[in-house]
Amino acid sequence: MKELHAVEESIKRIVGELSEKEKRQDEVLKLQREVIRDCALAIRHLHTGDLKEAEKTTAIAEKKLKQVSLIDKGLKHNSAQCFQEFVEVRSLLALVQRKAVPSQDELGVDTVAYLNGLADTSGELRRAMQIALGDGKRKDAQYYFDCLSELYDNLMLVKFSSSLVGPLKHKQDVVRSQVEQARSEMLRSS
């Protein structure tokens, strides 16, 4: 029917566009899983003291993340979780090396990924503190506790709706709990 010719042409174009987006989405999902696994492995290396492997694995994750950024355009950022994990590992890596935590701009991530990634770093800082305590390294444990406390103080300045910051409010509550538990562990160890 000639009356539906424009509809038919539009549908053909839409199917082509959606097919292309679906291929990119599948690629993003695959890369996202790889980045998340790489970040988890890098964190494991950090906690076992293998800084060289942590740096190497983090660099691999960063290359994949750049691919994700390119492919994810126009897909409504299905890959937010891997950016958040990347912020977490890069923050922890910097702190373990006694360096400054990278800024949002340095990491090239959006606000929600940055804030939530920083919040997730709290659990890893507490774990690093516990490992240091277990190894009898009180000074290192104090350093990680101080980092955790300062991170908490900074994150608590962000008070906005979850429509703007995602699950940050819940994560702030978790960070508060991490600080309280860590403080108790530090006091018990002295």
Image (cartoon, rainbow, N blue to C red):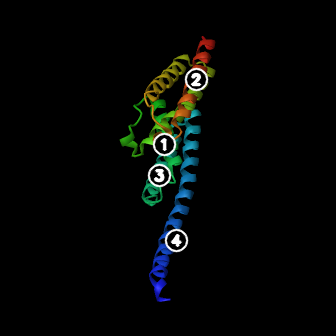
Q: Nearer the viewer, mark 2 or mark 3?
A: 3
Per the rendering, the mark at residue 103 is: none
Q: Residues within 10 Å of mark 3 (few under 14, many from 20)?
A: many
The structure residue drawn at horizontal position 63% and vertical position 21%, both measured from the top left corner, is 134
Q: CA distance from mark 2 to mark 1?
A: 38 Å
Please name whichever residue, 133 or 80, is drawn nearer the observer in this view of the structure: 80
Which of the two labelled residues, at mark 2 and mark 1, occupies the earlier sequence position? 2
Q: How many marks?
A: 4
Q: CA distance from mark 4 to mark 3?
A: 23 Å
Q: Which amino acid, mark 4? A: Ser
Q: Nearer the viewer, mark 1 or mark 4?
A: 1
Q: Is residue 34 left or right of residue 114?
A: right
Secondary structure beneath disc 1? helix
Q: Residues within 10 Å of mark 4 (few under 14, many from 20)?
A: few
Q: Residue furthest left?
A: 105
Say if 12 sits above or below 176 in the image.
below
* Residue assigned mark 1: 163
Secondary structure beneath disc 2? helix
* Residue assigned mark 2: 132
Q: Are marks 4 and 3 in contact (CB under 8 Å)?
A: no
* Residue assigned mark 4: 19
Which of the two labelled residues, at mark 1 and mark 3, occupies the earlier sequence position? 3
* Residue assigned mark 3: 65
Q: Which amino acid, mark 2? A: Ala
Which of the two labelled residues, at mark 4 and mark 2, occupies the earlier sequence position? 4
Which of the two labelled residues, at mark 1 and mark 4, occupies the earlier sequence position? 4
Say if 46 sits above or below 3 in the image.
above
Q: Which amino acid, mark 3? A: Leu
Q: Nearer the viewer, mark 4 or mark 2?
A: 4
Please name whichever residue, 162 or 25, is drawn nearer the observer in this view of the structure: 162
